[in-house]
Amino acid sequence: MSKKVKKLSDKEYEKELYKLQVELCKLQAWVKRSGQRIIIVFEGRDAAGKGGVIKRILEKVSPRIFQVNALPAPTERQKSQMYYQRYIERFPAAGEVIIFDRSWYNRAGVERVMGFCSDEEYQRFLKRTPAIEQGIVDDGIILLKYWFEVSQKIQAGRFQKRIDDPCKQWKLSPMDLTAQQKWDEYSEAKDQMFLATDSKHAPWFVVNSDDKKTARLNCISHLLSQIPYEEIPFIKPEIKKSKGQQYNPIDYEYNVVPEEY
């Protein structure tokens, strides 16, 4: 019988998360100083917790350096372009970390399962993607790819919470509503995607996300371990007060928000 894993308490979780967010800030300083370019791809089943991890990554860092992309469905013009084109234009410049909340791998997942692409387009994607990712890495960009896996039972429970909670209903999409029905099709698509695109230069890393808190800590910790960043010393500045005549503010009439709570 397998030993039951003890869940983290909220206090333990927040403590560990803060430590990792401090390291993310150190990573940010190094990226800015070194001019490094980083791409982080988050893929996985619907309601697997990708958004929660991304939120915790972004909480303490600058949106000018850590930028998230969650692209909508392609326009008619974009459909006529090279498939990767609308993603490539979002790639990082020096000193940027670009996060893709779903990426070019839509073609190997939802587009394949839902019939939004032809079999020829799908096969072409599987064949070309490793070479394109080799080009990304050869250009000096750090590329990390994470797949979030969740059990069917947990996924169903999270969907129900989205349905019941008015603050989460916006998260529901037409694709979410087919995820349980097409569970096996998505499983097969993921297996084929891994088989074709899990390479030495751009491997897939799988995050078990049934426990959201553990998944967040594991993913961020692993992400940090994959980047050879160095701590940039921070010299604390001295805050100096103004000298001379005391400043007297002009007496304006302000519209004050009533203290109702």
Image (cartoon, rainbow, N blue to C red):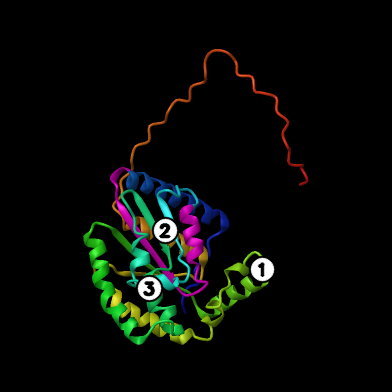
Question: The disc labelled 1 sits on which kind of residue?
Answer: Asp
x and y, in percent, of residue 211 in the image? 51, 68
**54 inside magenta stretch:** yes
Residue 148 seen in the figure: no
Q: CA distance from mark 2 to mark 3?
A: 21 Å
Location of mark 2 (residue): 220
x and y, in percent, of residue 4 in the image? 50, 72
| Side (left or right) of 256 relative to 184 | right
Question: The disc labelled 2 sits on which kind of residue?
Answer: Ile
Location of mark 3 (residue): 105
Of callouts 2 and 3, which one flags the residue occurring earlier in the amino acid sequence?
Answer: 3
| Side (left or right) of 63 relative to 224 | right
| CB atoms of marks 3 and 1 within 8 Å | no
Total marks shown come to: 3
Read off the magenta span.
33-58
Q: Looking at this view, is 75 or 183 the one in front? A: 75
Q: Nearer the viewer, mark 2 or mark 1?
A: 1
> Can you name the residue that lies furthest to the top here?
244
Question: The disc labelled 3 sits on which kind of residue?
Answer: Tyr
Q: Circle 3 sits in a helix, a strand or a loop, which is it?
A: helix
Crowdedness near tag 1: few (<14), some (14–19) or many (≥20) residues, C-alpha within 10 Å? few
Q: CA distance from mark 2 to mark 1?
A: 28 Å
Location of mark 1 (residue): 165
Q: Nearer the viewer, mark 3 or mark 1?
A: 3
Q: Is residue 230 above or below residue 181?
A: above
Q: Nearer the viewer, mark 2 or mark 3?
A: 3
Crowdedness near tag 3: few (<14), some (14–19) or many (≥20) residues, C-alpha within 10 Å? many
